[in-house]
Image: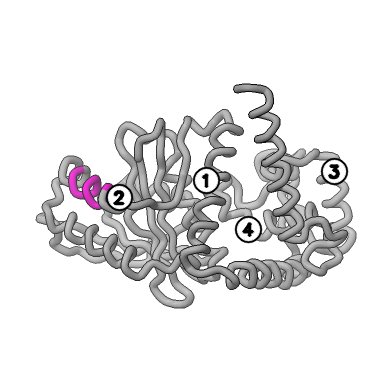
Amino acid sequence: MPENDLARRIDAVRRFNRFYTQRIGVLHEHLLQSVFSLAEVRVLYELANWPSTAQATARPTATQLAATLGIDEGYLSRILRNFEKRGLIKRKSSTTDARQNLLSLSEQGRKAFAPLNARSRDEVGAMLGKLSAAQQQRLIEAMHTIEALLDATGRADNAAYVLRPHQPGDVGWVIHRHGALYAQEYGYDEQFEALVADIAAKFILHFDPKRERCWIAERDGEIVGSVFVVRKTETVAKLRLLLVEPKARGLGIGARLVTECVRFARQAGYRKLMLWTQSELHAARRIYTEAGFRLVAKEAHHSFGKDLVGETWELKL
């Protein structure tokens, strides 16, 4: 790349950074009209939402928190000491490593975080409210593109896959691959493909970008997975159509897709995330269990040319 081209691109990225940091108010001494700095608010957010990040522990250690946020452990330690003095966090000794403390918000900490979270949602809502639905979708897609590209190039363990929002043609792929793959692996007939087509058509026809989302997983430019979050009621969302191609399994794509669903549903204001699956889909059930879902109902039924046991799973957000 010519040196002058690189310089122009560097300037463009820096210009965007200046514009966006000014637009979302992070240059203010305190964030969201509060007594907290940006770093402090990020720490409070991670502690309040840690299960949604699909980490192995229900509560993080300071080391895990620093790694997740990408900040210096000494700097984080000062923030945590300040929080502890103010009664915002609790520490509990790890049962597996006595040298480590597990961190969580205290009741006072949750009360301090709640208005910050609400104010952040209101400010973003006001910013989006100035745009049409189509403009909002373009903005979200652009943000996902930035996130996917920087995540793919910045992480060594991403196994060269990225997640992106759906584009024209993607939903047709979802219908086709569900029909073909479930026939091949589980012996489902064309009625299953019809069910998937109905779900997908309703998603497209009634798509609400503020409260619904489709993620497409790509690896080496090829689609290898998908999942949807759709609105059921004002407080309940449904996770639907999780699929990972056989050649892309074992890379953590399924777990990452489910994690994104949980994170989005919580940020969209839902109280519960539900899903319906079959007892024989062992890999998917394992992902749901690890993400915190619990089995709440099961019922035998004859569908898709087979005798099956349908299961309803729920996650309180």
Q: Amino acid at mark 3?
A: Tyr
Instruction: For marks 1 and 4, give the CA distance.
Output: 24 Å
Q: Amino acid at mark 2?
A: Gly
Within 10 angstroms of label 3, few (less than 14), some, or many (20 or more) residues? Answer: few
* Residue for badge 3: 75
Q: Residue at x 30, y 35 (%)?
A: 246
* Residue 291 in the image, given as x and y percentages of width and height: 48, 52
Asked if labels 3 and 1 touch by Cβ distance under 8 angstroms, the answer is no
Between disc 3 and disc 4, whose residue precedes?
4
The disc at residue 169 is 2
Q: Quadrant of the C terminus?
A: bottom right
Q: Residue at x 52, y 46 (%)?
A: 145
Asked if labels 4 and 3 touch by Cβ distance under 8 angstroms, the answer is no
Considering depth in this image, is 28 or 19 the residue closer to the camera? 19
* Residue 4 in the image, given as x and y percentages of width and height: 68, 27
* Residue 162 in the image, given as x and y percentages of width and height: 47, 40
* Residue for badge 1: 145
Instruction: For marks 2 and 4, give the CA distance.
Output: 34 Å
Between disc 1 and disc 3, whose residue precedes?
3
Q: Residue at x 23, y 64 (%)?
A: 198
Region rendered in magenta: 173-180
* Residue for badge 4: 49
Considering depth in this image, is 16 or 221 the residue closer to the camera? 16
Magenta span: chief secondary structure: helix
Instruction: For marks 2 and 3, give the CA distance.
Output: 47 Å
Q: Amino acid at mark 1?
A: Thr
Q: Which residue of the protein is positioned furthest toward the top in this rendering?
A: 2
| Front of the two marks 1 and 4 | 1
